[in-house]
Image (cartoon, helix red, strand yellow):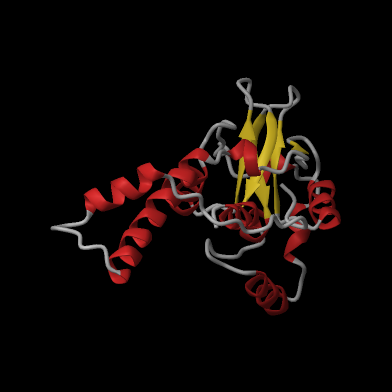
């Protein structure tokens, strides 16, 4: 799913089962007043959204055009591809096309001396302090030398809810989607995930 093509937000379709489940989850006797109805609707809406979060899969929201970097690509080629495509990271593949890692701005920054939670400006400060370009040390290095491995991947049938939990738990910005042989078939980014919430209403 392309971040340039935002999907229209649609209302969540609340089923009779959602309403019944909502009413069963409420304590005590329900006298249907406008306030009660709003409460039933609020709970039913939350249940419907949760149901749809589990029904919507990676295959429904992923970008299918995966920009991959070969493990033996030099870092000039890797950085150039990321810059050219305007992306902050990409999966790294081996000679058989299987994902073996992920390379991102964070990996470059880490190799240039930034702390784990460091930023580009931290690297600039280090460059100015040391009066030199910290990227020079990465000359003649390959993607395999600095990539994060093993890559965290998932199958196309993983739910949107599970993707959101995984991105938060692992503190990652993208999730490569792979086939049974570990080859990329798509990628879900945080942007794709945010856009998918529009689909949930």
Front-most of 18 and 192? 18
> Which residue shows up at 68% across the image and 57% down it?
8
- Residue found farthest to the front: 32
Residue 192, given in percent of the width and then of the height, sits at: 64, 52
Instruction: Classify residue 71 by image quadrant.
Output: top right
Residue 113, x across and y down, in percent: 62, 63
Answer above or below: position of 150 versus 201.
Answer: above
Give the x, y percent position of residue 132.
76, 71
Q: Is residue 64 left or right of residue 43?
A: right
Residue sitting nearer the eye, 193 or 143: 193
**Residue nearest the observer in this picture, 187 or 27:** 27
Residue, x 57% and y 31% (percent of image)? 155
Is 115 placed above or below 60 here? below
Where is the C terminus found, in terms of image quarters? bottom right
Position of 33 relative to 87 (above/below):
below
* Left or right of residue 182: residue 169: left
Quarter occupied by residue 32: bottom left
* Count of marks, rendered view: 0
Position of residue 142 measured from the top left corner of the image (x, y, whole percent): 75, 42
| Closer to us: 9 or 19 | 19
Image side of residue 89 versus residue 162, left or right: right
């Amino acid at each position: 799913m392309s971040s340039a093509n935002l999907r229209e937000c649609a209302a969540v379709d609340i089923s009779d089962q959602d309403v019944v489940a909502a009413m069963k989850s409420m304590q005590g006797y329900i006298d249907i007043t406008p306030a009660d109805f709003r409460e039933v609707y609020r709970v039913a809406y939350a249940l419907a959204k949760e149901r749809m979060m589990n029904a919507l899969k990676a295959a429904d929201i992923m970008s299918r055009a995966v920009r991959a970097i070969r493990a033996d690509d030099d870092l000039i080629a890797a950085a150039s591809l990321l810059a050219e495509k305007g992306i902050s990271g990409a999966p790294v593949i081996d000679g058989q096309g299987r994902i073996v890692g992920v390379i991102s701005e964070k990996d470059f920054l880490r190799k240039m001396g930034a702390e784990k939670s460091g930023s580009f400006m931290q690297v600039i400060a280090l460059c100015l302090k040391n009066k030199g370009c910290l990227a020079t040390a990465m000359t003649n290095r390959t993607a395999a030398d600095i990539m994060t491995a093993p890559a965290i991947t998932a199958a196309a049938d993983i739910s949107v809810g599970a993707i959101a939990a995984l991105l938060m738990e692992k503190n990652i910005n993208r999730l490569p989607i792979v086939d049974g042989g570990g080859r990329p078939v798509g990628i879900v980014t945080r942007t794709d995930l945010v856009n998918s919430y529009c689909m949930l209403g």
